[in-house]
Image: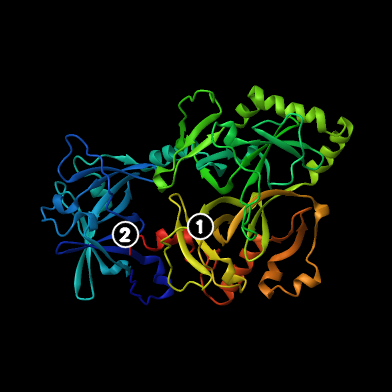
Amino acid sequence: MEMPSLDLAPGAQANVQLFGTFHLGEFELALPIDVLQEVVSFPSGMTQIPLAPDYVLGLFLLRDMMIPVMDLARFLGQPAVGDQANRRVAIIKADQSLLGVTFDHTGEMLRLASSQIVRFDNGANATGLIAGAFHFDQRIIQVLSAEALVRLPGVPQANSALLALQARQRNALRKVSKVISFHVNGRHMALAMDAIHEIVRVPELEHSVLADSVCRGWFNLRDRPVPVLDVSSFLGLEASSLASPDASDAEDMRRIVVLRDKGFYLGLLVDDIDSIVAHTEAQLLPMPPTRGQIGLFANVISRRDTGEGDLILISTSALFANPYMAHLAKGHHDLYLVTDEEEHSSDARRKTQRETWLTFDLDRPMAVRLDQVCEVIGAHDPLVSPPGSSPYVCGVLNTGHALITVIDLRHVYGMEPFVETEDTRILVVEHAGHKYGLVVDAVRSITSIEPSNKLLVPALIALHLNDELRQDMHEVAEIPGETTLLLLDVASLLRRLAEEGETQNAPDIGMPGTLPAVHDLGAAVAVS
């Protein structure tokens, strides 16, 4: 939106008013910015109100607030111009009420001295819809009265304070939870993230005296015996193979999801780890009882709104309560565990030291602290590309509940250009109250890292890292029997990018002081 400047003496600034202008047929109208909350596209769905005047179009939901909408052209007796779907709705607030008013399209934002505005003294019997007018650039623009608009006959009084309170109460009930999604024989399933002890690659399994078609053996996880269960076989599906992929260069995507309950462990063999998925209680649908699996499948997470497949949520408590599972967990605990005294001492020591990390690939194995990751999502398109963005900004992603700036880490760290594959993932992280998406080649697993396995980046490795990577990778971690991980410092990365943006005066990634921040984009275009 264009905003013509007005040169005023410093003492006259207090007598300046801002107006947003709109076009309605042959009329050009204006509203004071202080009553104009935002401008939105014409709603795709509208609930009609019985016995309402024809100029009251109905109600629509805006961030959980029910907003009445009036057709100003119809009230004024003006013919409809163009497609209704292309019109705009200005949300105004007056006398503690909210109202949506339709216009053909938005115009400018004007800064005017109060002396330029001619106020109208409407008679007692008049609606007072036009509060005044002003002359600007060879045009006469009429100023609408927001108070008169919300008091028009038949317009519902939507109390803004009450609506906001109700919206906050509803949002409080929508606590966001996280799950880890994975595949089992083509089925998309999930487990609550806080129920997962860790996720590891498939190690060489020890023989178990309790082994059968479901229990494939056990492995030692830091002195803890973990029985490995073939989830596919347990569910009556085709048994999973423990053989490694045939091709020498093919990576084994299978993982073992380790669960723990009161000192007992279970390891679930799954085909792969897909994503970290955030969901609300409203997305949980009750799972119909399945013969032989009653209670095991707690719910289905509906993702119809995002166009992704639904997830079957497995109940961890039901798993451990299952007689067969309980027998395996306790049996391996009793048969293969170190002494209780050793267990207690080891537990106490590791409980205070162990950290949980999400491992991923970005030209090499890396990891980020799990508590810094809000969710993991698949690569999305299309992305909105804000003008003037830095080359490392892929665009802005609309997840359905937030706008997230997506950053190409390969570009940031001077690696080969990003090529999207089916394994590409976006790690959604949070920093300074804002969310960002980090594009990585693939997500591998969740693992625990003890401080004794972490060390500063050796000089030999540092020599092969570019300057940016050295600034954000201060430590490496040795994973026994696996590999060396570079540990990404997310706070350092985003802080550095923000500082670069300020230095270059290029508002790229939405950090405070560097943008129109991503979360402010809606306000920036509200009256454009």
Under mark 1, the amino acid is: Glu
Give the label on residue 275, or none: none
Q: Where is residue 261 in the image (x, y as percent from the top left)?
A: 70, 31
User: Would you say residue 431 is visible in this rendering?
Assistant: no
Q: Residue at x 18, y 41 (%)?
A: 153
Q: Mark 1 points at which residue?
A: 422
Chain-order first, disc 2 or disc 1: 2
Badge number at residue 32: 2
Percent coordinates x, y for residue 120 in the rendering: 20, 59
* Disc 2 from disc 1: Cα separation: 50 Å
How packed is label 1: few (under 14 Cα within 10 Å), some, or many (20 or more)?
A: few
> Dot 2: within a 10 Å radius of its alpha carbon, few (fewer than 14), some, or many (20 or more) residues?
some
> Quadrant location of residue 10?
bottom left
Task: Indicate the quadrant where residue 26 lies.
Answer: bottom left
Of 4 and 6, the residue lying toward us:
4
User: Residue 412: horizontal and vertical position, in percent?
Assistant: 59, 71
Residue sitting at x 58%, y 45%:
271
- Look at the numbered disc 2 and give the secondary structure of its residue: strand
Residues tagged 2 and 1 counted as in contact (Cβ below 8 A): no
- Residue 231 or residue 167, whichever sits in front: 231
Locate the C terminus by quadrant: bottom left
Q: In which quarter of the image is residue 258?
A: top right
Camera-nearest residue between 359 and 205: 205
Q: In the rendered image of this protein, does residue 434 appear above or below residue 307?
A: below
Element carrying mark 1? loop
Q: Which amino acid does label 2 sit on?
A: Pro
Report x, y in % for residue 478.
78, 57
